[in-house]
Structure formats: C-alpha cells, structure tokens
Image: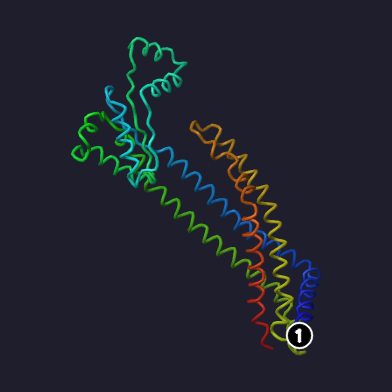
C-alpha cells in the first residue's frame, strides 16, 4: 500500500511538472539563477584565494650578508629561521647565483654589464629570502634581526642589511587589506546566498499557490498531508535537478570565458602569473564531481524543502 501511494505521488509530481509548463519554466529559470549564484560563489572564493596567495607569495624579506660571510654560517642561520613557526620558506641565494641572475636580467643593458667588468669582482652579497605565512609576521623577523643580543655573534657580525624597512609600507598595507578582502568575500557570499534562497522559496510558494484548490480537493476527499505534499515535493526536486544541470553547463562556459578575460588582463602583468591562468576552468574540470554534487544536491534539497514548507499553509482545510 505504501509503495503504491509513493508511486502515485511520484507520477503525479511528474505530471504536474509537465502539465504546468509555464510555471515549471519560470521556476527552473529562478532556480538556475540561484544555483548559478551558488556556483559563482565557489569560483569567486577560488579566484580570491588564488589572488591572495599570489600576492602573499610576492611579499618577502631579503637578508643581505657581508661579502666575506662564510656559507656555513649563513646555512646555519637558515636552519634557525626555518624552525620559527611564522616562517613558511627560506631560500639561500649564493653570491654566484646572485651575479648570474643579475647578469641575465640586465644582459641587454650594456652600461651595467660594462660596469661589472670594470669592477673586476662580484659585488653582490649572498642572500636569504624569507617568506612568512602571513604578511603581518614579517615584523617578528625584523625584530629578530634588529636585536643583535639574541643572535649568535658569528651571525650578527655577518648580516649587512635587510629589506624589511624598505618594504614595510607595502607589508603593513597588505596586512590590513588581505583580512578585509577575505571577510568581505565571506559576507558577500552569505548575503547573496540568503537572497537566492529567499527568491527561490518565494518562487516555489507562488507556483504552489496556483494549485491551492487542487490541494483543498485532495484534503476534502481524505488525502493525508503526506500524500498531498508528495507531488509538489517531487516537482520541486525535479526543478532542482533540471536547474542544476543547466547551471553546470552555464558555469562551464562562464569559467572558460572568464579565464580568457583573465589571460588578456594578466598578459600585461610583469610578474609570474602562470598560476592564475586557466585557473577557474581547470578548477571546474578537476573538481567537477564535487561541484556537481554541491549544485545538484543543493537544487534537490532547496526544491524539495521549499515545496514541503510552502504546501503546509494550504493543508488546513
């Protein structure tokens, strides 16, 4: 008996979905927009995270050593820095690597190359390039370098200079801007998601309003609340599935198109932006199963739950 009732509810839901074609079309359009908003939030957060990570990676502090500094002492200090909880990465650049990189960078600048030849020796010091997990943590590195008493004597005597104070203004600004961008992104995401949910629920409620007489008749002839709700919940689930598929197709084209715009925009950027090219579409392809589950699952839950709630007010006959 229960199986028969379930089969009838599902069949009625399918019939109602196809019979009320205009209402179904309107609901699917609104559902698709809502699920597109949800999908766009996923990619917005992905893009924001990638940009923030790239900006963080561009910020660093260089520690310059005297020309006569022994490599063993520098590498020993490198190990000390790597043990600090704030530090994410420390790279050692020898004097030979520094002059090779400098020569390659200015190989077309004849006066500079000729000037190096005139000097007759390598004027560039060995360097430690330090990156912290957050821009605000560079200050602790600067404090360590400035407090000579806490450094071993063989280290403090070979440190010539550092780039923290030259980059301090940029580091301080990033320390304030990055958390603000992250918080703003979350607030915007939550606000848009709430708006999408409200619009979707109201759309379902309007579509069910047109069937209030049908619900009343079902109740008058003895249908249970579950049986009266069933066809509308099934229709809501169908709205979610169809809208989810449409949203996935649009998101594929949208991410590909946005990537093309990013490539054109970033082609003029002088830094290394390879990690940002084709970011969104690659993310869509590599995480397609997860995105499909989120989008289709959200559509099914949203459609079914909205229909279940919206029918309730018409059950008391």
Left or right placement of residue 229 versus residue 95 in this view: right
Dot 1 lies on which element? Answer: helix
Residue 300 location, quadrant = bottom right
Give the total of numbered labels.
1
Taking depth in this image into account, of 217 and 157 the one nearest to the observer is: 157
Image quadrant occupied by the N terminus = bottom right
**Residue 12 place in picture, x, y as percent:** 79, 75
**Residue 171 place in picture, x, y as percent:** 35, 41
Left or right placement of residue 2 versus residue 60 in this view: right
Which residue position is annotated with label 1?
Answer: 218
| Residue 243 versus residue 142 in the image, above or below | below
Left or right placement of residue 257 versus residue 133 in this view: right
The colour scheme is: rainbow
Characterize the local packing of mark 1: few (<14), some (14-19) or many (20 or more) Cα atoms within 10 angstroms: some
Left or right placement of residue 301 versus residue 238 in this view: left
| Residue 275 versus residue 85 in the image, above or below | above
Taking depth in this image into account, of 263 and 202 the one nearest to the observer is: 263
Q: Residue furthest left?
A: 149
Image quadrant occupied by the C terminus = bottom right
Residue 279 location, quadrant = top right
**Residue 63 place in picture, x, y as percent:** 31, 32
Residue 302 location, quadrant = bottom right
Q: Residue at x 57, y 51 (%)?
A: 43
**Residue 106 place in picture, x, y as percent:** 44, 19
| Residue 152 versus residue 9 in the image, above or below | above
Q: Residue at x 59, y 68 (%)?
A: 198
| Residue 16 versus residue 268 in the image, above or below | below
């Amino acid at each position: 008996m229960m199986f028969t009732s379930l089969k009838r509810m599902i069949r009625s839901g399918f019939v109602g979905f196809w019979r009320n074609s205009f209402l179904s079309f309107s609901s699917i359009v609104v559902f698709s927009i809502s699920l597109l908003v949800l999908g766009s939030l996923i990619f917005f957060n992905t893009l924001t995270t990638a940009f923030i990570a790239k900006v963080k990676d561009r910020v660093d502090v260089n520690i310059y050593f005297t020309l006569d500094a022994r490599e063993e002492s520098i590498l020993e200090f490198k190990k000390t820095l790597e043990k600090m909880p704030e530090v994410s990465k420390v790279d050692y650049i020898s004097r030979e690597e520094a002059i090779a990189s400098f020569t390659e960078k200015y190989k077309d600048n004849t006066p500079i190359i000729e000037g190096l030849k005139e000097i007759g020796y390598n004027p560039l010091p060995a360097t430690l390039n330090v990156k912290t997990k957050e821009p605000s943590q560079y200050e602790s590195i600067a404090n360590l370098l400035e407090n000579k008493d806490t450094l071993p004597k063989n280290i403090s005597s070979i440190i010539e200079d550092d780039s923290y104070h030259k980059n301090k203004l940029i580091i301080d600004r990033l320390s304030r801007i990055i958390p603000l961008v992250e918080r703003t992104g979350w607030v915007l995401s939550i606000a848009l998601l709430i708006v999408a949910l409200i619009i979707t629920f109201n759309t379902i409620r309007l579509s069910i309003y047109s069937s209030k007489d049908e619900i009343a008749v079902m109740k008058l002839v003895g249908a249970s609340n579950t049986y009266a709700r069933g066809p509308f919940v099934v229709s809501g689930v169908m709205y979610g599935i169809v809208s989810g598929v449409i949203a996935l197709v649009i998101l594929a084209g949208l991410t590909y198109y946005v990537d093309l715009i990013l490539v054109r925009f970033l082609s003029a950027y002088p830094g290394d932006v390879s990690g940002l090219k084709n970011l969104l579409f690659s993310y869509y392809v590599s995480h397609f199963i997860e995105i499909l589950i989120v989008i289709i699952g959200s559509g099914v839950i949203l459609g079914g739950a909205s229909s279940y709630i919206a029918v309730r007010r018409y059950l008391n006959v």
